[in-house]
Image (cartoon, rainbow, N blue to C red):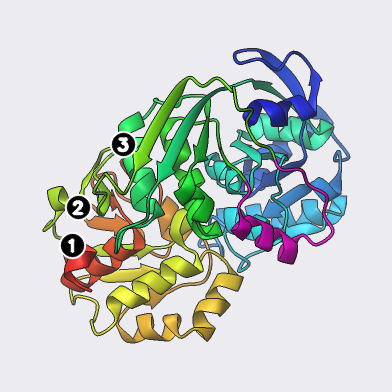
Amino acid sequence: MAEKVLESHVVRGTVRPGKFIVARVDRLMVHEVLGSRVIPLLDRMGVTRVWDPEDIVVVNDHWAPAPDIRSAVIHRRNRQFVSEHGIPHFFDVGKGICHQVLPEAGLARPGELIVGCDSHTNTYGAFNAFATGLAATDSAVIIATGKCWFRVPESIRVEIEGEFPEMVTSKDLILRVIGELGTDGANYMAVEFHGGLVDRMSVASRMTTCNMSVEAGAKTAMMGVNDAVREWLKRRAPGADWDAVEPDEDAEYYRVMRIDLSEEELGPMVAGPYLPTNVRPVSVYEGIRIDQAFLGSCTNGRLEDIALAAQVMEGHRVHRSVRFIVTPASREVYLEALRAGYIEALTEAGAVVTNPTCGACVGGHLGVLAGNEVCISTSNRNFRGRMGDRESQVYLASPATVAASAVTGKITDPRSVV
């Protein structure tokens, strides 16, 4: 699938694994790195006009609202840039996290080549797009030219069959996958997800799965178009032209992984410090005391995640020694959760519900950890110092496991709470 998308966008070069090409980019997403690093690069390059204002998306999300003067200055630079260049797709403070609001706006479509100045841009592969994260210099060149260089990746095929057991989610599944692949098992490769379970996944679950593929080194992650995606695009990108991409029947893969949940007893999974791939069944870490539980991020801050947490919390309260922070991924998600009663239920149970933002996930604000504190989080990374002090510890888990742990004050199998 990755090769087919690149083939339809190539400007120069031969699309073959390992070869370098120049390709036309459909869309570029930039967040605070625009104001902190990209704009200074554009100034040094002498760029005075962008390649296409319609195809640039700007989001203020990582430190939003600004918790300090430096963040406020960056946000102001972004606003000025958007105004000066007439960029219509601007999501300011309060709109939400880039990887949620861009698809909500119908700006992630099948067959597209999308670049983001954020490593978790892989998320848009849930919509059958070749989506990848690049750094500031490449983003600046794309803003100026609409093109970028790529090395054509080899592909890994992951076939998933069966059904999710009770209190097991796509987060547990992708932790299981990257735990097997390791930190570089998919390094600069395209990961394709196929199979009956993938075809039945909700949009939110697909986004979670593609989002975390980068933790195994994946350049991109892609899924075919299912009914959930078709309905999503029908509502959010009416009239947009797109062509779904599927692999040829005789496509060659670097590796094929097969997971059948009707044969494999997949349970809740947890990644311990300090690697997302340090994955074990929840029973291995069960009983470890926590100071904070965090539900949010571009990985698991969507409506179905908040709904699952509210289900687990029903009839319970947050443990007196735990801070349970809930951060919806977007304003739309926040309002939907509010209307459904989830925000009220979680707040009454003792959770702290924040505005949509990256917040605690990146250790920016709204949940920074002190030294030796322990957090169980639905986010995507648990590197040393990721959420605060370098001596803090972060365990990654599903919304169900995080909510159950918030109830007991220690890492807990959600099946024992519900």
Q: Secondary structure at mark 3?
A: helix
Badge 1 or badge 2: first in the primary sequence: 2
Q: Disc 1 designates what residue?
A: 412
How crowded is the residue under tag 3: few (<14 C-alpha within 10 Å), some, or many (20+)?
Answer: many
Q: Secondary structure at mark 1?
A: loop
- Work out how far the residue at label 1 is from the one at label 3, CA to CA, in angstroms: 20 Å
How crowded is the residue under tag 1: few (<14 C-alpha within 10 Å), some, or many (20+)?
Answer: many
Badge 1 or badge 3: first in the primary sequence: 3
97 relative to 8 in the view: left or right: left
Q: Position of residue 169 (x, y in %)?
A: 37, 57
Q: Which quarter of the figure has residue 364?
A: bottom left
* Stretch in magenta: 225-244
In the image, 323 versus 334, the foreground residue is 334
The answer to whether residue 149 is magenta is no
Which amino acid type is marked by label 1? Thr
Q: Residue at x 62, y 65 (%)?
A: 93
Q: Cβ–Cβ below 8 Å for labels 1 and 2?
A: yes
Q: Secondary structure at mark 2?
A: helix
Q: Residue at x 70, y 17 (%)?
A: 15
- Work out how far the residue at label 3 is from the one at label 2, CA to CA, in angstroms: 13 Å
Above or below: residue 15 compared with residue 331: above
402 relative to 163 in the view: left or right: left
Q: Residue at x 63, y 56 (%)?
A: 229
Q: Disc 3 designates what residue?
A: 179
Q: Disc 2 designates what residue?
A: 282
How crowded is the residue under tag 2: few (<14 C-alpha within 10 Å), some, or many (20+)?
Answer: many
